[in-house]
Image: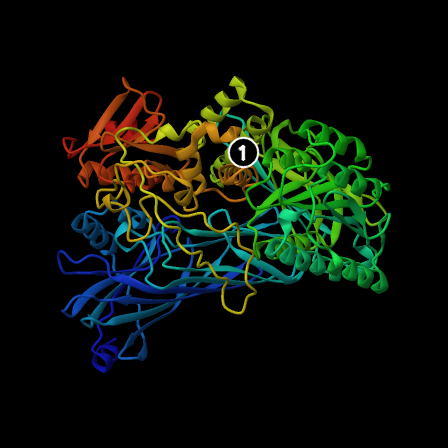
């Protein structure tokens, strides 16, 4: 240790705290009073997983913006059971290995930091496996680079391995100045199936059945939650894995993940029958037509040898490349490409005839049948009544072909198109009239080009399942995965059976699932299920008309899980400042280095809330003044900057009735976003007056973050912020520790008719009886 200190003028003393799980990224906190945690320039993590052992290498750079040399404490919480294998500091560009010394006083030192900083976000570290070291000197107006490497054995159960990375930090350092990069490489002896993160939108790719990569890269990243990654393994052709969550005495929640193997041979891929139907009316002239042609050509050039295909163009009339689908031979594909080249935009829009002609070419039930339908307008030729068009399409669809609609621009009837696709086992996607057409259609085709298993059905055996979403399980494609969410009433082990068409016949896969009586793990599942359920209900209201029982259920779920909808945007109460619209932040998410670019979602959906551009929330945990304003916002130009929450809050229920126009398209997108959610959404956090912590929604009322379960008349224990009573409760309850990170004023329900309130006039100390009574 002395050699290190003499060589680089460095003092390092490290301490370990033994506790439960980890939940915070590294911080460098100056010891000088009044100086907050140093800014994070970048944070990069590279993870190498081999079977169940993960080695994580972290590289961080901190910036000292002050004019003085600082002494600081470096803090890095570790996942449970992790061991530090390497720790390096850089001084004047020289990398030096630091020594680690244990200190029993670590917990007291850290609690002292929490009290001094008066930041509830720092509570996240207490009681965790915590690495600490003293760092000196941190040069004035300079940088301090730190590298740490740790090894952990990951939990494994039922074919599912879970990796956790400590990311959450305090509000003062809630954003990197440059990038946050997470790169994960997975190697497994048993074949890898599904890769899923409930916390972050990730890119993932399986190189083969035994090697995979995953990760993300975000500029100016908000470090507000841990990164969690699940991956499943199975030697079967199709893997099916189960996660559950259940509160004692209540029905449970489940999430099923299914994915096929990667190395399917060509003869195992099901040949599909696919028809491309393109609107060539006059309104498609110019850039729309040019990009649409490119999209169709891309798909034609990607057809498989066993596929049958056709191309149909429609305007005032309907014309097919062939009278019926033909084999995807090189000669036929070239003829089709020439047909596309000759297409010109002119005339009206015969949607009804185009659909019936396309569906007439699908006559064989035993193969995957798909219709890709692209249009930019309303029906103007032939049958124009939406309800008749919907009925005619259903009648013509004798083999349950899946209709995938791509609506171009805003002057389209979204309700007609959604009913056509939804009523025929498909989906609608809305794109801008530019290169997004080509990009979106090409990405879609890449996903569906290699069908593996179609017409899927799930049987839960002895388990009483209900509210399973989606209602109709989508097909499985090579390289794809599906997620099914639902609820269950009873408990026990049960055989789960997945059946569907595979190859030349039907195939059945049987898996064992355990549905427990109580399970507090995976608490992201209930809100994810509720998100999909609300999307399903809103879709029914939007397309089928407003019904009281459906609206009531939307409101109930919205309040219970803190999800903003057109009927509950009022949850941001009169005590909460109104959110000001911002210009949309560019989507700077990029995949980890050496990875192909991920598919992006529809651009132009901005971010709002107290973690918007320019900083975090107030130091007391209240919504930041920098991100709120008292005036109302509106107008078509501002609408482009709206997130889904803003669409709901600004337009509310009346937008559910719109059929066409920019507002209708955005509402259709917003409802679909809920209906097809695969990861929990952040609208509660983004809505300025809502938070969702440890399975509970909180709203900002009367200057306090208030549990939505709280009711007047409850027995309340008031405690003072950062008092002995405060620390005593968080030492007894990890739940309260999470909730108390909300701020200096919090009201939380802790039992039947009981609540704890952090209040300026609260108690400094509490006795044993009070601690037991008010600990959930």
The residue under the point 27% across, 61% down is: 39
Query: Residue 532 placed where, x, y %?
Result: 54, 35
* Above or below 295: residue 401: above
Query: Residue 649 placed where, x, y %?
Result: 40, 34
Position of 38 compared to 221: left or right? left
**Image quadrant assignment for residue 495:** top right
Position of 737 compared to 158: left or right? left
* Residue 247 visible in the displayed image: no
* Residue 671 visible in the displayed image: yes
* Above or below 401: residue 432: below
Q: Check disc 1: other Cα within 10 Å, few if <14, some if 14-19, many if 20+.
A: many
Query: Residue 760 placed where, x, y %?
Result: 15, 34
Instruction: Check disc 1 and report its element: helix, strand or loop.
Output: helix
Position of 766 compared to 375: left or right? left
Position of 481 compared to 561: left or right? right
What residue does disc 1 label?
535
Query: Which is more toward the observer, 330 or 525?
Result: 330
Query: Which is more toward the observer, 590 or 511?
Result: 590
């Amino acid at each position: 240790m002395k050699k290190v200190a003499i060589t680089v003028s460095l003092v390092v003393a490290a301490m370990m705290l033994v506790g439960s799980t980890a939940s915070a990224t590294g911080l460098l906190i100056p010891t000088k009073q009044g100086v907050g945690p140093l800014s994070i320039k970048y944070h990069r993590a590279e993870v190498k997983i081999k079977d169940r052992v993960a080695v994580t290498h972290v590289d961080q750079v901190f910036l000292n913006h002050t004019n003085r040399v600082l002494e600081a404490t470096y803090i890095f919480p570790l996942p449970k059971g992790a061991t530090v294998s390497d720790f390096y500091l850089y001084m004047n560009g020289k990398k030096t290995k630091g020594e680690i010394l244990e200190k029993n006083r670590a917990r007291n030192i850290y609690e002292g930091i929490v009290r001094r900083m008066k930041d509830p976000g720092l509570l996240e570290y207490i009681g965790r496996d915590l690495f600490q070291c003293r760092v000196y000197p941190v040069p004035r107006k300079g940088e301090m680079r730190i590298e740490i490497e740790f090894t952990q054995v990951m939990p494994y159960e039922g074919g599912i391995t879970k990796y956790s990375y400590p990311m959450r930090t305090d509000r003062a350092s809630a954003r990197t100045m440059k990038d946050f990069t997470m790169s994960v490489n997975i190697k497994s002896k048993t074949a890898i199936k599904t890769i899923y993160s409930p916390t972050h939108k990730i890119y993932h790719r399986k190189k083969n059945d035994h090697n995979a990569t995953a990760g993300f890269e975000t500029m100016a990243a908000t470090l507000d939650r841990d990164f969690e990654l699940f991956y499943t393994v199975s030697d079967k052709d199709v893997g099916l894995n189960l996660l559950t969550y259940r509160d004692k005495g209540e029905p449970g929640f489940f999430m099923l993940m299914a994915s096929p193997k990667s190395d399917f041979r060509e003869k195992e891929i099901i040949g599909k029958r696919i028809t491309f139907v393109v609107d060539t009316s006059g309104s498609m002239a110019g850039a729309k037509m040019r990009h649409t042609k490119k999209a169709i050509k891309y798909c034609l050039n990607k057809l498989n040898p066993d596929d049958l295909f056709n191309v149909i163009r429609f305007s005032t009339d309907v014309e097919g490349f062939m009278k019926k689908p033909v084999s995807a031979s090189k000669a036929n594909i070239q003829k089709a490409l020439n047909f596309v080249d000759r297409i010109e935009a002119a005339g009206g829009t015969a949607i009804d005839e185009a659909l019936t002609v396309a569906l007439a070419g699908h006559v064989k039930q035993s193969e995957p049948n798909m219709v890709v339908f692209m249009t930019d307008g309303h029906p103007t030729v032939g049958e124009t009544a939406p309800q008749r068009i919907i009925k005619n399409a259903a009648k013509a669809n004798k083999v349950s072909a899946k209709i995938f609609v791509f609506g171009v621009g805003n002057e389209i009837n979204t309700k007609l198109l959604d009913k056509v696709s939804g009523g025929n086992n498909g989906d609608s996607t809305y794109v801008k009239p530019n290169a997004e057409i080509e990009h979106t259609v090409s990405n879609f085709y890449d996903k569906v080009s290699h069908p593996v298993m179609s017409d899927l059905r799930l049987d839960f055996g002895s388990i009483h399942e209900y509210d399973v979403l989606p209602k109709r399980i989508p097909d499985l494609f090579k390289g794809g995965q599906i997620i099914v969410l639902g609820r269950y009433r009873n408990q026990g082990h049960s055989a789960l059976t997945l059946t569907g068409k595979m190859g030349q016949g039907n195939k059945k896969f049987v898996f064992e699932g355990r549905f427990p009586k109580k399970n507090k793990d995976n608490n992201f599942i209930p809100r994810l299920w509720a998100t999909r359920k609300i999307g399903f209900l809103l879709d029914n209201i939007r397309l089928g008309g407003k019904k009281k029982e459906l609206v009531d259920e939307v409101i109930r779920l919205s309040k219970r899980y803190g999800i903003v909808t057109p009927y509950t945007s009022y949850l941001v109460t009169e005590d909460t400042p109104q959110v000001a619209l911002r210009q949309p932040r560019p989507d700077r998410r990029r995949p980890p280095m050496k990875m192909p670019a991920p598919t992006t979602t529809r651009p132009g959906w901005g971010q709002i809330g107290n973690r918007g551009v320019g900083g975090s929330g107030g130091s007391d945990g209240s919504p930041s003044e920098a991100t709120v304003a008292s005036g109302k916002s509106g107008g078509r130009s501002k609408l482009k900057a709206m997130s889904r929450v803003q669409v709901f809050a600004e337009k509310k229920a009346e937008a559910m009735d719109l059929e066409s126009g920019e507002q209708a398209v955005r509402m259709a997108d917003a409802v679909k976003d809920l209906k097809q959610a695969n990861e929990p959404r952040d609208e509660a956090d983004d809505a300025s007056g809502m938070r969702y912590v440890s399975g509970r929604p909180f709203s900002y009322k009367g200057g306090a973050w208030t549990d939505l379960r709280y009711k007047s008349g409850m027995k309340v224990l008031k405690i003072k912020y950062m008092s002995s009573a405060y620390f005593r409760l968080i030492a007894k309850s990890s739940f309260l520790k999470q909730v108390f990170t909300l701020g200096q004023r919090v009201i939380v329900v802790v039992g039947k008719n009981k609540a704890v309130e952090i209040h300026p006039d609260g108690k400094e100390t509490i006795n044993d009886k009070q601690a037991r009574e008010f600990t959930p």
